[in-house]
Image (cartoon, rainbow, N blue to C red):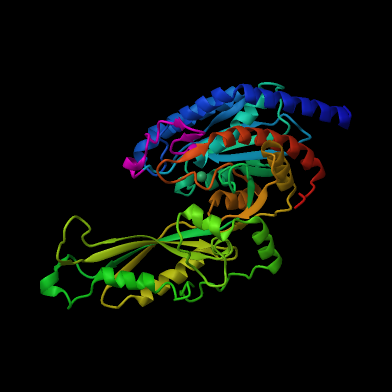
Amino acid sequence: MSVASSRHVRGGAKRQALLYARHTARRFLAELETFCGYPTISGDRRRADDIQRCARWLVARLRDAGLGQAYLIQTAGSPIVYGEWMGRRDAPVLLIYGHYDVQPVAPLNEWRTPPFQATVRGEHLYARGASDDKGQLFTHVKAIESFLRTSGRLPVNVRVILEGEEEIGSPHLSSVLTADPQKYACDVAVMSDTRMLGKGRPAITYALRGSVSLELDVRAGPRDLHAGYFGGAVANPIIILSQLLAGTHDRHGRVAVPGFYDDVKPISSAERRFMRRHGPTDEEILRNAQTRTPWGEAGFSPYERTTIRPALIATGIEGGYAGPGSKSIVPARAGAKVNVRLVPEQDPQEVASLLRNHLVSSTPRHVSVSVRQHAGARAVELDRRHWAMGAAATAYRRAFGARPVFLRSGGTIPVVGMLQDILGVSTVLMGFGLPDDRIHAPNEKFYIPHFTRGIEASLHFMTTLAQAGLAKAPPEL
Ligand SMILES: [Zn+2]
């Protein structure tokens, strides 16, 4: 078959798939509503059965879509939903990654409609997981169906990995991949678990910060003491903990932990210019945060502070009595949680040790402090000029009628680093979420037009990837 006629056939297949997706849009949305009905909270062990049921439901959807090979890979935690179609010898292999687990729903009373009863209001679908990540991953599943149910073929080979433990740090994925990397061999990965700049304003994320978390516990004695009999004469863990936390920053918003910035490499002025041209404005960031109070390291914009600079965030604090009325005690203990967002070159372990040493050595000798560390993930930078980035840019332009911007994200997706380390592939982060989707918060939603366009973008992406995979041309920026 000549190049021209193969392109013609491919173009025809895409047209049929696009038509199928348009005609089937209503059922696709109904299926997404069912999908969102499964309470797949990976952080809650009582949901293990729901997670299994949802995973089996997803396998059935992959089979319906036409993937002959679709099954569960059981782990010690949630199963991985796997599917593949390897029908083209001459085309690249695309790995589609998504996660079907979700965050907890508390505070439940702030939800306008039940979190696991997907509800359409206006142009949005409201449910826990609607945007993160069920709605976004489903765009690819439905794009696959649209191709396979019309022409019986996909433009590229695909492997689909849908994980059920992303929200708890993917504790079992790396061992599954490491056990048989050949099985998951691919040329590039795509993940839709990020956001766009706004409605109809697509964005490709090319950098993610790393993350590591610590919990500290300050203890002064075996039990609470009477505030009158002992107050003023004994150490107060809440005060000590507050001083420890306050001591992590100086007055200029810089982290005051010795060595914290040692491995942070300066960013070129060209990159900073690129960021200014493509990134959100200060106003947009503050508007999305619904705050007027910027804070942080002097000399950097809010976008830079949340992307190319590391940050130390106190995420929780507890201790003493917080119930109604007052209780006169000197508490025996107090605790806090701290999260550090890392930039490339910063090692999660090393930074965690620096912080631990600083906290321990700053604690007065007569009280005890214990520090617990959670698994960390390093930061990731992806090549903006990778050939698959160009295919994604074209796909976005065709589906959304707008050229995507290239963004850095302050967030962390450990799987991107895992795919790079274990499978040696780069990931295209092609998100369809909106900045105000309230992911991880009450009333999470997904903008339905982006679900429809996302399916189309996935169709265009697979087609363009097949062509780009042969030429391997970088995108125009
Ligand atoms: Zn997610």
> Would you place residue 45 above or below residue 255 in this image?
above
- Residue 47 shown left or right of residue 55 in the figure: left
Quarter of the image with the N terminus in it: top right
Q: Is residue 172 visible?
A: no
Which residue is at the front of the view, 153 or 125?
125
Q: Specify whether residue 124 is painted magenta.
A: yes
Residue 188 visible? The answer is yes
Residue 464's place in the image compared with 420, above or below, is above
| Residue 359 % position (x, y) | 38, 72
The image quarter containing residue 98 is: top right
Which is more toward the observer, 450 or 354? 450
- Residue drawn at 54 percent across, 44 percent down: 434
- Residue 104 screen position, x and y as percent: 39, 43
Asked whether, in this view, residue 22 is left or right of residue 166, the answer is right
The residue under the point 66% across, 36% down is 457
Q: Is residue 116 left or right of residue 269?
A: left
Q: Is residue 268 magenta?
A: no
The residue lying at 26 percent from left, 77 percent from top is 366
Taking the spot 69% from the left edge, 60% from the top edge, the residue there is 274
Viewer-side residue, 50 vs 33: 33
Q: Main secondary structure of the magenta part?
A: loop
Labels in figure, total: 0
Q: Quadrant of residue 49?
A: top left
Relative image position of residue 232 (x, y in whole percent): 18, 77
Q: Which residues are magenta?
A: 106-130
Q: Position of residue 134 (x, y in %)?
A: 51, 36
362, 103: nearer the viewer? 103
